[in-house]
Amino acid sequence: MDSATKTEDDGGQPGTSGLRDGARPARGRRRLRVLGGSLAAGCLVLGGVLVLLPEKRPPGPLPGSPARTAVTTGVAVALPELARLIHQHEGHVRESPRDARAWAVLGAAYVERGRRTADAASYLKAERALRTSLEVRPRRNAEALDGMAALANARRDFRAARARGEAARKLAPKRWTTYAQLIDAYTGLGEYKKAQDALGRMLRLRSGSAVLGRAAGVYRDRGRREDAAAALSDAAAGASTPAEEAMWRERAGQLAWERGDPEVALRQFREAVRLDPDQRAAQAGQGRALVALGRTPEALGAYRAALSGQPLPQHALELGELYESVGRPRAARAQYDLLRERVRREGVGGVDGDLVLGRFEADHGDPASAVRRLRAEWRRQPGIEVADALGWALHRAGRDQEALRFAMIATDRARGGAVRSAPYVYHRGMIERGLGRYGPARRHLDEALRINPRFSPLHAPVARAALAEMGAPALTAPPEVRPSADRPDRRPSTDRPDARPSTDPPEPRPSTDPPEARPSANPPDTRLSTDRPDARPSTDRPDTRPSAGRPEA
């Protein structure tokens, strides 16, 4: 009893009274002292770690958010979500300046904000963020290179976009987003076969709405409108956010507008704005469609709304021409002044505005200045848009013979001009009219009005007046070119894709004959193969446009 009491008083445990000389209690006390020392040391270490950790963590998880996924895949993001993403990553890179991936995502978000709001300052921030990402991780940083390619495309610097995109592809050949940037770069440079190949690689690597939307752009550029419309419909149906669906609906509306269906275009544009009220491109599209439907006051309101949130020079040009068409020259001049100012501001942010400024100068300013700008643009990036604009500027400057060479590039399928564009065909028809080639001029002006009868509030009436002035073609051909009974009429091979070689000498091309030498037995609505809506190029057909065939600027 006494032994047991003594043992408990010494710190032993009950039931240890049989231990000899208190050996186990002593060993237990030593273990407790060791354990206590270990716990104290652990607390000191943990306390030191907690002191070194930042007091404030980023608000919410950085990876995997829908907004982050969208900006890194080139899909539209609602502006409030985009603002939160930017704020989140700005705070994170202040606390973790060595996080190369966060810098790359921040740069991509700035690019998207610049694109959605026409804020050139965002492009400067994007460039700094992306360059920082590359400085932190100079090797194997495909994400930052992708962002640099997207930035260059947004600035219309397609050579830089191609260089960055190809560098990213070399690092990560299976990164599908790289091919989306390369498609835009190759298209801007007139390298349509490469754009088609990039699309093929992207389709093999990825599926989904983002890929379908990109594919629709390539289909449209190759004249495959039905395929483009189907791809955009599927992209809208598979969109993961309202802003993404609005993006694809806006493009579907643009496609409907280009084919001369303003009612369908207006429905698509309105749905896009309902889904994303900040979809300013869709608001400008509403303006175009409403003008075509004769609802000018509503169209003016739509254009003003678009410019209030995205003051793009192109939108100012369209609104100015609308004012001019309704006899309001002072309001038109105000928009043209805004256009010049916006081009200047965008230039500070690295945006190439020579294309839109050249288009403006050709029709409303100094055509000679437009020719100089667009020649330089053609040397930098010889795409179809630039070819059309340069050809029109040359026409306005009174140089129709040279102008026709560029107009043919913009409209001949063999030269890459597979886009069925009413303005492009109209420009070619007016150039041919200036050269006295009235047969081709009638055909192309008629075709422009068939594609879209109300393609421009200023130029569509000019096309109709030019057709009326030239009159209908003669009912019979002149005697010297009338087909004989033993020799059927043979049109130039460029006008018929199914024409077979003949042993007979070919008929002279319209480009070298006076207008009266062209057979007039053909009906006036006969169209070139490049203008046929059902002409669909094969996806595996090699590009037949040699690079050396471009006219020298």
Image (cartoon, rainbow, N blue to C red):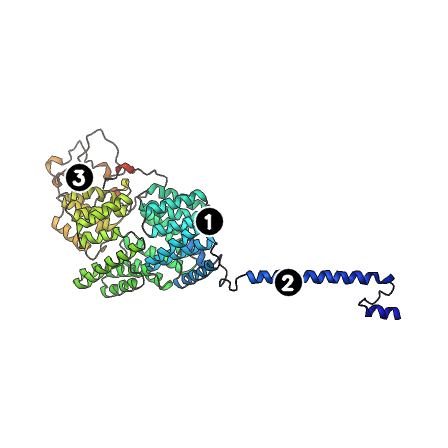
266 lies left or right of 516? right
Among numbered discs 2 and 1, the one appearing first in the sequence: 2
Horizontal and vertical percent position of residue 57:
51, 62
- Give the number of the mark in front: 3 or 2: 2
* Mark 3 or mark 2: whose residue is earlier in sequence: 2
Contact? badges 3 and 2 (CB < 8 Å): no
Mark nearest the camera among 1 and 3 is 1
Residue 505: percent from the left, percent from the top? 19, 30
- Residue on which disc 1 sits: 137
The label on residue 43 is 2
Residue shown at 38% from the left, 42% from the top: 197
Mark 3 lies on residue: 511
The first of marks 1 and 3 along the sequence is 1
Residue 232 lies, in percent from the top left, at 37, 53
Q: Is residue 24 left or right of residue 62?
A: right
Question: Which amino acid, by three-letter code, is at mark 3?
Answer: Ser
